[in-house]
Image: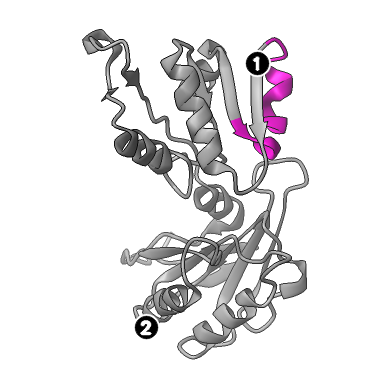
Amino acid sequence: MIPEAMEALKAADIIVGYKTYISLIRHLFPSKTFISKGMRQEIERCRIAIEKALEGKDVALVSSGDAGVYGMAGLLLELCKESGIPVVRDSVNKENCNSIEIRIIPGVSALNAAASILGAPIMHDFASISLSDHLTPWELIERRIQLASEGDFIVVFYNPRSATRPHLLERAIGILKEYRSPDTPVGIVWRAMRNGQRSLICTLDTVPIEEVDMHSVIIVGNSQTYVWNGWMITPRGYKIRKEKI
């Protein structure tokens, strides 16, 4: 979390979020009121946050990583728009008691956290793709993987493998293999910057698919990515001049 996020949590009357994420911060604010919900109850979480804000409460709606990257910010704004709720960016200009002020506070996204653990794998253009077909048809996900592969993008996979779709990661890797060498470096990070964090650098041909889960982020290098001294590195393209020392 960036300092602004911590300050927002300290100032909040109520903290709303997915139960797993709430469990990560509950001990920091033992006197706060928490409202936690399970998986796939995102709309309900947002509606509760809006309802409490309209009651005059200061509400923190939490996401993992960055609220604007596969997080709750977009859904919250969509619900306000569809419900016709006036939204302001600055409470100084708030005139309507039925309006709410919204601040979207960024965080460290999972891909940035994972990249820092692996080295410097996303130093060039990359594509971030979620393998969850809960909200996006698999056919569209396949197309995005194919186009990213054709364009030699570094590819970051979010939500790579769950109990209900264990086969999709294997299919995604199959598409990448049509365009990339089997020796292409691949980095996997589990629970980035949380308790239980671990990482692995392997190749496209040796990804331990059975070990990957929803707490994992996978970064697949492009044609220039290499491994040195335990670091996964994608050159940015700078010309490094060799000089005699």
The mark closer to the camera, 2 or 1, is 1
| Disc number for residue 150 | 2
Q: Is residue 3 visible?
A: no
Does 231 sit left or right of 85 as displayed? Answer: right
Report the span colored magenta.
17-31
- The three-letter amino acid code for the residue at tag 1 is Thr
Which element is circle 1 on?
A: strand
Does 125 sit left or right of 62 as displayed? Answer: left
Q: Which residue does the image show at 28% across and 22% down from the upper left? A: 89
Residue 30 on the magenta span: yes
Q: Which residue does the image show at 72% across and 31% down from the upper left? A: 23
Q: Quadrant of residue 21?
A: top right
- The three-letter amino acid code for the residue at tag 2 is Glu
* Residue tagged 1: 33
Q: Position of residue 125 (x, y in %)?
A: 35, 64
Task: Name the quadrant of the N terminus.
Answer: top right
The residue furthest bottom is 178
In the foreground, 133 or 65: 133
Q: Position of residue 113 (x, y in %)?
A: 56, 47
Kindly report the secondary structure that dominates the magenta region of the rendered protein: helix
